[in-house]
């Protein structure tokens, strides 16, 4: 079963569990506040549109587009955010014809290895305008670790999960010309490995 089939299968379950993003509200609001009026924003691997929904509640002026590999996730995201635009696509092949002001990468990195996140960061940098912002949320661990494990929303399926380090993500941001304007590290409820944390960071490209 490939990624799109896997997330199609569990899309409604995932949406029910993760639609509420109030746990990450402070970092998401910091990102929203960094964007000029009527900014174009791309939500990568948008899932059921949970982050998009929060951002549009805070900033209804945003011109938001979301992409995900799962058609079912896109269907839910569009239902939850009728004023936004969503399409099926692979984040490894970002459109380059249009420059934008903001990019959201919400819990994307656990599905990408080191080389893939380096390529993704380079692609993101190339589509952002001067003064543009990026929002990243992910699970981090020091030392880094890659595991094959059961997902909480996909209990019978094995997923490869990459736990990158906080320092590595911050280095990637700086290498790509971002100035970090906000970061936050949170403990994860019920997480057995206490070295694993939720990490949220907002970066801006200086004008």
Image (cartoon, grey):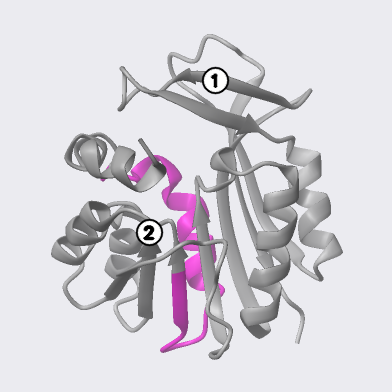
Q: Under tag 1, what secondary structure? A: strand
Work out how far the residue at label 1 is from the one at label 2, CA to CA, in angstroms. 22 Å
Q: Under tag 2, what secondary structure? A: strand
* Residue 154 rendering spot, x and y as whole percentages: 31, 26
Residue farthest along the top direction in this orientation? 192
Q: Is residue 20 among what the camera can see?
A: no
The residue nearer to you, when weighing 137 against 112, is: 112
Relative to 199, does residue 204 appear above or below in the rendering? below
Horizontal side, residue 178 vs residue 3: left or right = right
Q: Quadrant of the rendered structure where residue 15 is?
A: top left
Q: Residue at horizontal 24%, vertical 36%?
A: 10
Of pointers 1 and 2, the one earlier in the residue sequence: 2
Which corner quadrant holds the N terminus? Answer: top left
Q: Residue at horizontal 53%, vertical 90%?
A: 98
Q: Residues within 10 Å of mark 2 (few under 14, many from 20)?
A: many
Q: Residue at horizontal 27%, vertical 67%?
A: 57
Relative to 87, does residue 139 appear above or below in the rendering? above
Tell me, for residue 82, which label it has, or none.
none
In the picture of the structure, the residue carrying the numbered disc 2 is 68
Relative to 133, does residue 192 appear above or below in the rendering? above
Which corner quadrant holds the C terminus? Answer: bottom right
Q: Residues within 10 Å of mark 1 (few under 14, many from 20)?
A: few
State the extent of the magenta-drawn residues as a range: 19-42
In the picture of the structure, the residue carrying the numbered disc 1 is 148
Q: Residue at horizontal 79%, vertical 55%?
A: 172
* Residue 121 rendering spot, x and y as whole percentages: 69, 62
């Amino acid at each position: 079963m490939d990624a799109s089939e896997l997330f199609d299968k569990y899309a409604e379950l995932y949406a029910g569990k993760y639609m509420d993003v109030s746990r990450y509200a402070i970092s998401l609001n910091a990102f929203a506040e960094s964007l000029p009026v009527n900014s174009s924003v791309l939500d990568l691997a948008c899932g059921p549109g949970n982050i998009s929904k929060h951002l549009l509640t805070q900033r209804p002026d945003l011109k938001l587009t979301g992409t995900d590999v799962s058609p079912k996730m896109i269907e839910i995201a569009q239902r939850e955010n009728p004023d936004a635009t969503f399409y099926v696509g692979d984040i490894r092949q970002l459109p380059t014809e249009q420059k934008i002001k903001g990019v959201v990468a919400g819990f994307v990195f656990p599905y990408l290895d080191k080389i893939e996140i380096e390529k993704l960061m380079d692609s993101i940098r190339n589509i952002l305008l001067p003064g543009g912002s990026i929002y990243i949320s992910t699970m981090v661990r020091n030392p880094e670790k890659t595991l094959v494990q059961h997902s909480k929303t996909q209990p019978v399926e094995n997923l490869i999960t990459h736990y990158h380090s906080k320092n590595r993500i911050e280095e990637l941001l700086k290498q790509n010309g971002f100035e970090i304007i906000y970061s936050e590290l949170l403990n994860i409820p019920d997480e057995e490995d206490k070295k694993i944390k939720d990490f949220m960071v907002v970066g801006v490209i200086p004008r």
